[in-house]
Image (cartoon, rainbow, N blue to C red):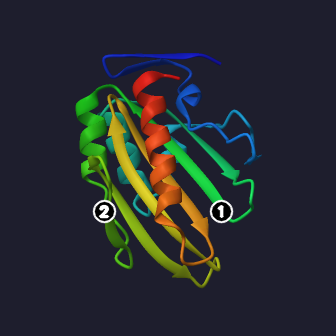
């Protein structure tokens, strides 16, 4: 699996740009990640048929996701990439992201365009979550960290920085 980035345009297999599983972590699902079709992405939303129409209109190319557990087993990390036909669309997708009403926004130091949310314990899942979204070039990204509350903001911030570096440099 290979990929390249030049001037914010990502080519090759989009899974190449996923945040790698740390050497002490363990992948949950395929180690290379899962491809995400437009139908799969639309399925994440309650208004899936409308989202599918929008994805087709804005030039959705492909996407990918990867999940892993940290080596200390304290956190579960999910990463999702959505690859669009232009940086403008990826920027607008990130800007349109609405945090959950129960979440509290916080910043990612050094990255003013990214959004981050601290989402309290969900009784259904028994875990709290930190979520960050942003974009780099023609790719929107989302990083979620799940764990027992309180989930350490530094864990999410570290993963977001590494995901941004991967999207910016391709390595």
120 lies left or right of 86: right
The location of residue 56, given as percent across then percent down, is: 36, 35
Name which residue lies at 53% across and 29% down: 17
119 lies left or right of 64: left
Residue 122 location, quadrant: bottom right
Dot 1 falls on a residue whose secondary structure is strand
Residue 61 is at least partly visible in this image: no
Q: Is residue 114 above or below residue 10?
A: below
Q: Is residue 19 above or below residue 110?
A: above
Residue 76 is at least partly visible in this image: yes
Q: Is residue 76 above or below residue 4?
A: below
The location of residue 2, given as percent across then percent down, is: 60, 16
Depth check: 65 or 25 in front? Answer: 25
| Crowd tier of the residue under label 1, counting other residues whose Cα lies within 10 Å: few below 14, some 14–19, many 20 or above | many
Mark 1 and 2 residues: CB-CB less than 8 Å, in contact? no
For discs 1 and 2, the disc positioned in front in the rendered view: 1
Dot 2 falls on a residue whose secondary structure is loop
Residue 146 location, quadrant: bottom right
Name which residue lies at 37% across and 60% down: 116
The location of residue 151, given as percent across then percent down, is: 54, 70
Q: Who comes first in sequence, dot 1 or dot 2?
A: 1
- Determine which residue is flagged by label 1: 75
Name which residue lies at 73% across and 40% down: 23
Q: CA distance from mark 1 to mark 2?
A: 24 Å
| Label placed on residue 98 | 2
| Crowd tier of the residue under label 2, counting other residues whose Cα lies within 10 Å: few below 14, some 14–19, many 20 or above | few
Name which residue lies at 52% across and 45% down: 80
In which quadrant will I find the N terminus?
top right
| Label placed on residue 62 | none
């Amino acid at each position: 699996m290979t990929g390249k980035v030049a001037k914010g345009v990502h080519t090759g297999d989009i899974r190449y740009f996923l945040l790698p599983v740390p050497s002490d972590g363990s992948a949950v699902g395929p180690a290379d990640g899962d491809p995400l079709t437009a139908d799969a992405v639309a399925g994440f939303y309650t208004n899936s048929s409308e989202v599918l129409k929008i994805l087709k209109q804005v030039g959705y190319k492909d996407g990918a996701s990867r999940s892993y557990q940290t080596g200390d087993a304290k956190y579960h990390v999910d990463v999702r990439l959505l690859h669009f036909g232009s940086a403008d669309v990826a920027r607008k997708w990130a800007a349109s992201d609405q945090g959950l009403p129960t979440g509290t926004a916080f910043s990612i130091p050094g990255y003013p365009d990214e959004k981050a949310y601290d989402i309290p314990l969900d009784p259904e899942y028994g875990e709290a979550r930190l979520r960050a979204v942003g974009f780099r070039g023609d790719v929107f990204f989302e990083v979620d960290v799940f764990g027992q509350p309180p989930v350490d903001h530094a864990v999410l911030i570290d993963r977001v920085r590494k995901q941004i570096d991967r999207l910016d440099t391709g390595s």
